[in-house]
Amino acid sequence: MKYLVMVQGSQADYEAMAGRGSAGSPAWDRAGMQAMFDHMNAINEELTASGEMLDAQGLAAPSTTRFVTVDDTGNTVVTDDPYAAAEGVVAGYWLLECASLERVTEIAARVARCPVPEGSPAYPVVVRPVDEVGPSLD
């Protein structure tokens, strides 16, 4: 079965990773960034070797987000940077093919153990099965 595994973050967290910490997101240093990359790369290498990795991407900062909607009159409405600095959003994902929910949960637990600076916010790792069948029309 396919699963989408998502990690979360906020604009403040992206700023912290660039060395600009705040009260809720302490600044990362070079060693902390290297530890995070080493942790994630090890997971990615294992998932690739096991054949479970279908795709994985980190997403750009929330400040680069654009929402496109249509108003009541049919006009396009574009909103840039719609998130508050502390609002959590999807920061990255893995698309995995795993034998079971238990297996993908093991992987998510490893992701959740990623090293972060002391005092950083804790976000859950979100696991969602991919619906490859679609909704029933019954």
Image (cartoon, rainbow, N blue to C red):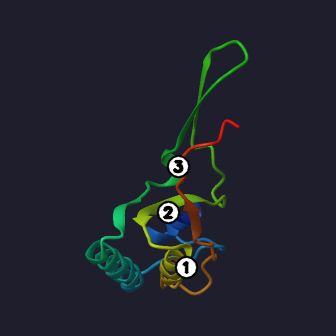
Label 1 element class = helix
Label 2 element class = strand
Going 38% across and 85% down the picture, which residue do you hit? 35
Going 48% across and 46% down the picture, which residue do you hit? 64
Please report whichever mark, 2 or 3, sits nearer to the chain's N-terminal start: 2
Badge 1: residue crowd in 10 Å (few <14, some 14–19, many ≥20): few
Looking at this view, name the residue that lies furthest to the top: 73
Residue receiving disc 1: 102
Q: CA distance from mark 2 to mark 3?
A: 27 Å
Q: Which mark is residue 53?
A: none
Label 1 is placed on what type of residue? Glu
Residue receiving disc 2: 3
Quarter occupied by residue 78: top right
Q: Between label 2 and label 3, give the one nearer the viewer.
A: 2
12 left or right, relative to 18: right
Residue 91 position (above or below residue 111): above
Please report whichever mark, 1 or 2, sits nearer to the chain's N-terminal start: 2
Label 3 element class = helix
18 left or right, relative to 120: left
Q: Position of residue 29 (x, y in %)?
A: 42, 81
Residue receiving disc 3: 63
Q: Nearer the viewer, residue 127 or 6?
A: 127
Label 2 is placed on what type of residue? Tyr
Q: Is residue 107 visible?
A: yes
Q: Is residue 9 visible?
A: no
Label 3 is placed on what type of residue? Ser
Badge 2: residue crowd in 10 Å (few <14, some 14–19, many ≥20): many
Badge 3: residue crowd in 10 Å (few <14, some 14–19, many ≥20): some
Looking at this view, name the residue that lies furthest to the front: 138
Please report whichever mark, 3 or 1, sits nearer to the chain's N-terminal start: 3
